[in-house]
Image: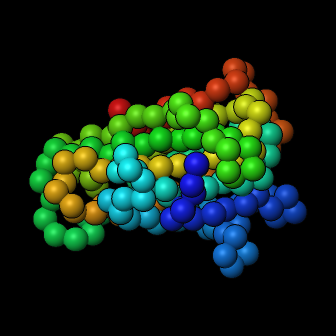
Amino acid sequence: MDIHGAQRLVWDEKRQTFIRVEDQKPIPSYVGSVFDIGMRTSAEGFSNLMALMDVPQGVMSIYGGSLLEVVNGPIAYPFQIDWQLMHGIGACIFDQEPAQGSTTFKTADDLKNREGLLFQWGGLQADSYLLRARIIGTGGVKVRCGVYPKATPGLQANVAGITVGTMIG
C-alpha cells in the first residue's frame, strides 16, 4: 500500500507524543493536522491523510472534525466523507480489509457541529496505521478537516480490534 500524500507521524517515546517526520516537531495536542479531503491519491478516490508509524502497544484513538470547513466554492448538501483505517507493519504492508465508515452532512449546521472520535483501537499486532478519506457528492469541492491522534501506551484493550467512533455514522 502506497502512503503517498499522507502526513507521516512517528511515535517519540521520550516525548510521549507523535512528531512529524519532515521537521521532527510534535503535533499540537487536540489541534493535530489539517487536511483537504477531495484530493484523490488512489484509484478508489481516497486521499491518504495520515500515516502513523512506530505506534506503541496500548490504546490509540483518532479524532476528527475540528476546523471543518469548505475550501473552494459552494457545496451542495447532503454529502458524505468515507473514512478508512488500515493497519500493518512497517508502514508498507497494510491489511486489505480496512475499518471503515461514513459521516453524512445534511446541512451547513452539520458541518459546523460535527467532531469527535473517528476510530479507536488496541491489542493489535501492528505498529503502523494509515487514515484515508474520500468525499462523495460535492462535485469536486474540497472540505478541510482537522484530525489528531492520541496514544495511551501500555493501556490494555478489553478486546483486540478497531472500533468506529461517534463522528462516523
Q: On screen, 166 above or below 130?
A: above
Relative to 118, is 73 above or below?
Answer: below
Q: Position of residue 42 (x, y in %)?
A: 42, 53
> Where residue 26 appears, x then y in whole percent?
69, 70
Position of 137 relative to 156 (above/below): below
Q: Residue furthest bottom?
A: 23
Q: Is residue 102 above or below residue 12?
A: above
Quarter occupied by the C terminus: top left
**Residue 115 in sight from this viewpoint:** no
**Image spot of residue 63 (x, y percent):** 52, 48
| Colouring used for the render | rainbow
Q: Residue furthest right?
A: 14
The residue at the point 75 percent across, 50 percent down is: 90
Is residue 45 left or right of 163 when viewed as pictured? left
Residue occupying image coordinates x 66% and y 62%: 9
Question: What residue sits 57% from the left and 57% below the top?
Answer: 3
* Residue 42 in sight: yes
As drawn, is 154 to the left or to the right of 127?
right
Asked if residue 161 lies left or right of residue 83, the reply is right
In the image as oriented, which residue stretches furthest toward the front? 43
Residue shown at 47%/49% (left/top)?
132
Tell me which corner region of the image, top left, top right, bottom left or bottom right, holds residue 93.
top right
| Position in image of residue 37 (x %, y %) | 36, 59
